[in-house]
Image (cartoon, grey):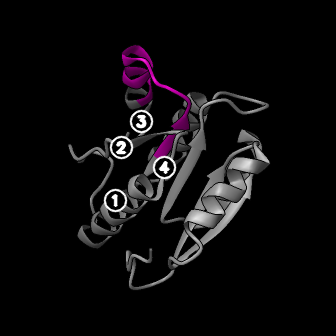
Amino acid sequence: MKSPIATHTQKWLCVEDNITFQCLIRSILADQSVKLEFVTHGSDAIDAFSANDYTAILIDLTLPDMSGLKLIEELSHIERSHSLNHTPMIMLCGQASPKLEADIYRAGADGLIEKSITTTQLWPSMSAINSQNQSHLTKNSANNLRLH
């Protein structure tokens, strides 16, 4: 099923060390106007984020070199310290407990997708991000994506 989410090509960073899950995300977004860039480590994500302008970032909770929570905090710090516009960050994780969910949003995530991800979860996320970009919402916005 095709869904016209974006009218222009978006560039997303996906920080995911599981090759199978990378393939799943690539497959789900294959018919969308999204250019995906994959990295497997938090340190590589920081380097990529510092050198590129992304529409959104998907971040795995558990990475080889740091937690996804720490990575979101680091990326948010870079945005604040350089007065950058906020890039929506969506956490990818297994089943999230209420405490973990609270920790994810406290760290600065804009959304949460459990790894039982489907197109019905990812497409609304893309639509919300596209709307946020069109409205030029910033990190201070009260609008959080809640996907699961």
Which amino acid type corresponds to the residue marked 4 in the rendered image? Glu
Confirm whether the magenta stretch covers residue 103. Answer: yes
Q: x, y percentage for residue 41?
A: 76, 42
Mark 2, mark 4: which one is toward the viewer? Answer: 2
Name, please, the residue furthest toward the bottom.
7
- Circles 4, 3 touching at the beta carbon (< 8 Å): no
Quadrant for the N terminus in the image: bottom left
The first of marks 1 and 2 along the sequence is 1
| Quarter location, residue 26 | bottom right
Residue closer to the observer: 3 or 75: 3
Under circle 2, the secondary element is: loop
User: Under tag 4, what secondary structure?
Assistant: helix
Q: Can you tell which mark lies on residue 147? A: 2
Identify the residue at image location x=23%, y=68%.
135
Q: Amino acid at mark 1?
A: Pro
Q: Nearer the viewer, mark 1 or mark 4?
A: 1
Disc 4 versus disc 3: distance between alpha carbons?
12 Å
What percent of the width, then of the height, locates residue 12?
Answer: 56, 64
Residues shaded magenta = 90-104
Residue under label 4 = 79
Above or below, comparing residue 125 to residue 18 in the picture:
below
Residue type at numbered disc 2: Leu
- As measured in the structure, the alpha-carbon distance from the residue carrying label 3 to the one carrying label 1 is 20 Å
The circle on residue 124 is: 1
User: What residue is at 71 percent from the left and 28 percent from the top?
Assistant: 66
Question: Do tag 1 and tag 2 residues touch (Cβ < 8 Å)?
Answer: yes
Work out whether residue 121 or residue 37 is closer to the camera in this orientation and state it: 121
Q: CA distance from mark 1 to mark 4?
A: 25 Å
What is the spatial separation of the Cα atoms under label 2 and label 3, in whole angstroms?
15 Å
Query: Comparing marks 2 and 3, which lies closer to the viewer?
Result: 2
Residue that mark 3 sits on: 108
Mark 1: which secondary structure? helix
